[in-house]
Image (cartoon, rainbow, N blue to C red):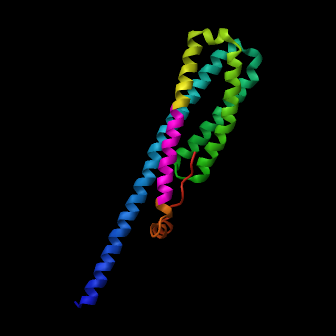
Amino acid sequence: MSSGQWASLGVAAVLVFWMVGAYNRLVALRTAIGDAFRQVDELVQRRAAAATALAARAGEAMASEQGALDAWLAAQTTARQAADALRARPVMANLAADLAAAEAPLAAAGARVMALLEQHPAVLAEPTTAAHLAALRETEARLVFARQLFNEAAQAYNDAVRLFPTRLLARLYGFGTAGRL
């Protein structure tokens, strides 16, 4: 073999090794998004369970506010369905946008229910209701950090996908950008 052939072979080997390394990096970053979403998903499920229990307990004492409780539970269901859809493909930007969009009406309905609960101190004084409310508040606080972790993983993945020359490989293998919550 001539020196030109050896040089061509060396360049081809470097290119193949780079492609394998870049592909593995993108796969690892995509997996990190899935791992981060599992935490978000678990907390969304816990929040829904705590909200359902709280609404059932408070609904007995706040029968006149049943419309607000029903709206809150409907928003919980919508957010849970959006999370279920995103669970299958956590890197899909449109599914992440759907979950983020479902969180806005949920926050508004939740704020309304919390304000109504504050107007009923007898309901809040019950130990079971207080326990459900504490679980809900703890879950909401943890969900903020889980969303942040998900968004950081999505940003790292998106940065890697957009970086030249990895961008060429990403197109070749169908790596798209991930959505944020």
Relative to 62, say whether 40 is above or below.
below
Residue 69 lies in quadrant: top right
Decide if residue 134 is on the left or right side of residue 74.
left
Decide if residue 164 is on the left or right side of residue 76.
left
Q: So how many labels did they put on this image? A: 0
Decide if residue 54 is on the left or right side of residue 159.
right
Residue 45 lies in quadrant: top right
Residue for point 65% across, 11% down: 123
Q: Position of residue 52 (x, y in %)?
A: 61, 24
Q: Position of residue 133 (x, y in %)?
A: 58, 20
Residue for point 42% across, 57% down: 27
Front-most of residues 174 and 3: 3
Relative to 63, say whether 15 is above or below.
below
Residue for point 64% across, 32% down: 76
Relative to 39, say whether 166 is above or below.
below
Q: Main secondary structure of the magenta part?
A: helix
Q: Which residues are magenta?
A: 142-159
Residue for point 57% across, 15% down: 130
Residue 140 lies in quadrant: top right
| Magenta stretch contains residue 146 | yes
Front-most of residues 53 and 24: 24
In what quadrant of the picture does the C terminus appear?
top right
| Magenta stretch contains residue 172 | no
Q: Position of residue 132 (x, y in %)?
A: 56, 19
Decide if residue 17 is on the left or right side of residue 153.
left
